[in-house]
Amino acid sequence: MDQPTSPFSKQQLLPQEETLEILKRKGELFIGIPKENQYQEKRICLTPDAVNAITANGHRLLIESGAGEGAFYSDLEYTNAGAEITKDTKKVFSCPMVLKVEPPTLSEIKLLNPQSTVISALQIKTQSKKYFEELARKRVTAVAFEYIRDEDGKYPVVRSLSEIAGISSVLIASEILAATHDGNGLMFGNISGVPPIEVVIIGAGTVGEFAARSAIGLGANIKLFDNSITKLRNIQTSLKQTIYTSTVQPKNLLKALKRCDVAIGATRGKDRSPVVISSTMVENMRKGAVIIDVSIDMGGCFETSEVTTHEKPTFEKFGVTHYAVPNIPSRYPKTASISISNIFTPYLLKLGEDGGLENSLRFDKGLRNGLYLYQGILTNKSVGEWFDLQYSNINFLIF
């Protein structure tokens, strides 16, 4: 009996006639936005204001009923903004372009029409080989928004969500310390005559920077650790003040952890976050101290961390309260939705101006960086190597 073959096994590049000139022509987009059904996901890609801007430019939006409820946007607000509302999930997924926060599930992929376009997160570490094979069978063109680069070569969506996560980590720590949450009763704030809260931040990326900015704004003393001198120097410059910085040396780190009231983990690694804080270090922390492990999305940087949920966000170990909820920005779905929407809206308007995604891919190198499937052909090297799938260079396919 013949075994089913992968859609990637017989990919080939056929010779094409030379394209002498590419002409941009404005086109009408028809975008479907389904309701997010993944656990704890309450965000939506476009706010009513963004929908209004897009429909005012002659594009159509079909939104599943209730898609904005998690972010506190009603169907009526979207209707008034010019969107069409439907309760038929299949109808939304049959749109030529589907816009989502979370990547589509295998059951949702079955609802897609052949040769449609999907723009969503990829979350490569949560995917399987079958996910890409199913998209390929539908000859889908797929863009991962976390890989889209801007003119400066930065990742705008990742940075925006990291800013939210960094600020959130300090706000969450402040809540947990309150006696009403069975905390030790300490308060952030530069109160006259009261020693400030001590905060240790591990990781000097965007999350670490905005955690530091928020903690300082609330009157805390901070100590920042990272093995990149450049990142530490950049944060000093960004904050416009001298703060305690150090490379990740166990002796200095242990000393800081013993004295701190809050420890925030914000490290990243290639495959997973490195475990920087050992169980012994946590055991030596003050009773009633709080750990916010923002790195839990990538495995966590505290050895004692265990994944928690928004419904039951904390647990205690060695007398230290741990908060380790993945996807912290979804705790503030309205702010996160506005932030994502601000990034998506100009891109979608540009797609319309360029005459569709294919033309935009030709002209926009940053958008092209987010592409991982083009008409069912895998174009992302990282995905190909990670899942042992054949991939092709996008430049050979669209030029």
Image (cartoon, rainbow, N blue to C red):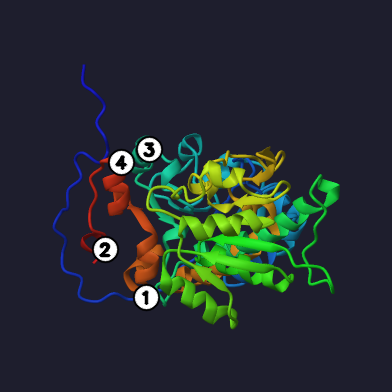
> CA–CA distance between discs 4 and 1?
36 Å
The kind of residue on which mark 2 rests is: Ile
> CA–CA distance between discs 2 and 3?
22 Å
Q: Which labelled disc corresponds to residue 385?
A: none
Question: Which of the two labelled residues, at mark 2 and mark 1, occupies the earlier sequence position?
Answer: 1
State the SS at label 2. Answer: helix
The kind of residue on which mark 1 rests is: Lys
Question: Which of the two labelled residues, at mark 4 and mark 1, occupies the earlier sequence position?
Answer: 1
Question: Which of the two labelled residues, at mark 2 and mark 3, occupies the earlier sequence position?
Answer: 3
* Residue 190 locus on image (x, y percent): 79, 72
> CA–CA distance between discs 2 and 1?
14 Å
Residue extending furthest toward the top: 1
Q: Which residue is mark 3?
A: 134
> CA–CA distance between discs 2 and 4?
24 Å
Q: Quadrant of residue 170?
A: bottom right
> CA–CA distance between discs 1 and 3?
32 Å
Q: Looking at the figure, which quarter contains the C terminus? A: bottom left
Q: How many circles with numbers are drawn on the protein?
A: 4
Task: Check if mark 2's residue and mark 3's residue have beta carbons within 8 Å.
Answer: no
Q: Which residue is mark 4?
A: 387
Q: Nearer the viewer, mark 2 or mark 1?
A: 2
Question: Which of the two labelled residues, at mark 4 and mark 3, occupies the earlier sequence position?
Answer: 3
Q: Which residue is mark 2?
A: 398
Question: Which of the two labelled residues, at mark 1 and mark 3, occupies the earlier sequence position?
Answer: 1
The kind of residue on which mark 4 rests is: Phe
